[in-house]
Image (cartoon, rainbow, N blue to C red):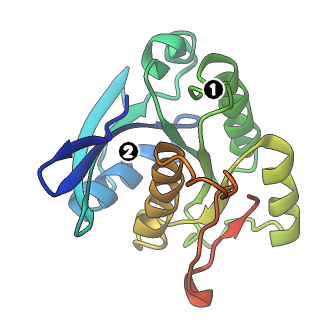
């Protein structure tokens, strides 16, 4: 689902973004932190799909409406993923740094995503890998170079250590994905390359593989 509609002096974009990964990795907490700037330990596991929206005044000429689809990580609902994935323009793929097995689960979700959704050019839709719960004492952190290599191999636009609880890199991760989506929406001018180039300040620069 995409926008690009001109409304007077600005352009409006509508992006459907999937939030996927195994059950219990903190997808719903991440969405709640991003949408409402709120965290709770009492959130129930998602059944089916939860839907949230957020409007961003990206700049003086660009309005972005995000539709975040928080997909249940239960195997039963993973089997229905083709229905939920339809029309998606980007994805946040989440795993729990304190549970290493959920990284394999995240890679399985990414593979399923790439098989079922592509851009208008036939490429996988942009996706960002989120290493959630980085605030926990038992969080296991892989070397950044290994994560960079994993991103390149699996086709992620980039990755972030995040914490929904402590609000670490939540906005930064979503904004990074949105930048990719806006670049996909805007064809390069004549004589320019179609490659995506993202400029970020050093202190907020994510590990990325584009």
Q: In which quarter of the image is residue 72?
A: top left
Q: In which quarter of the image is residue 103?
A: top right
User: Which residue is depicted at the point 40% across and 71% down?
Assistant: 167
Tag 2–tag 1 contact (CB < 8 Å): no
Viewer-closest of 26 and 85: 85
Question: Residue under circle 2?
Answer: 28
Spatial CA span between label 2 and label 1: 19 Å
Q: Residues within 10 Å of mark 2 (few under 14, many from 20)?
A: many
Query: Dot 1 lies on which element?
Result: helix
User: Which residue is depicted at the point 60% across and 68% down?
Assistant: 198
On screen, 84 above or below 92? Answer: above
On screen, 146 above or below 73? Answer: below
Q: In which quarter of the image is the N terminus?
A: top left
Viewer-closest of 66 and 21: 66
Viewer-closest of 177 and 44: 177
Instruction: Determine whether, in the image, residue 164 is placed left or right of residue 187.
Output: left
On screen, 65 above or below 163? Answer: above
Q: How crowded is mark 1: few (under 14 residues within 10 Å), some or many (20 or more)?
A: many
The percent coordinates of residue 20 (x first, y second) are: 53, 36
* Residue 143 appears in the figure: no
The percent coordinates of residue 189 (x first, y second) are: 55, 54
On screen, 197 above or below 31? Answer: below
Q: How many labels does the image show?
A: 2
User: Which residue is depicted at the point 43% across and 18% down?
Assistant: 84
* Mark toward the viewer: 2 or 1: 1
The percent coordinates of residue 90 (x first, y second) are: 51, 39
Question: Residue under circle 1?
Answer: 113
């Amino acid at each position: 689902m995409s926008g690009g509609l001109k409304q007077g002096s600005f352009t409006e974009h509508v992006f459907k973004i999937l939030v996927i990964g195994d059950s219990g990795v903190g997808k719903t907490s991440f969405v709640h932190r991003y949408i409402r700037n709120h965290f709770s330990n009492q959130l129930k596991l998602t059944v089916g799909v939860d839907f949230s929206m957020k409007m961003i005044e990206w700049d003086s000429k660009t309005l972005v409406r995000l539709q975040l689809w928080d997909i249940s990580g239960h195997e039963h609902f993973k089997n229905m993923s083709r229905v939920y994935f339809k029309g998606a323009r980007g994805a946040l793929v989440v795993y729990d740094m304190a549970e290493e097995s959920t990284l394999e689960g995240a890679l399985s979700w990414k593979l399923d995503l790439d098989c079922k959704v592509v851009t208008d050019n036939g490429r996988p839709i942009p996706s960002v890998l989120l290493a959630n719960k980085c605030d926990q004492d038992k969080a296991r952190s892989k070397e950044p170079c290994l994560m960079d290599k994993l991103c390149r191999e699996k086709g992620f636009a980039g990755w972030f250590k995040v914490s929904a609880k402590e609000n670490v890199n939540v906005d930064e991760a979503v904004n990074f994905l949105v930048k990719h989506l806006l670049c996909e929406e805007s064809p390069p001018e004549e004589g320019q390359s179609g490659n995506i180039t993202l400029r970020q300040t050093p202190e907020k620069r994510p590990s990325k593989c584009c």
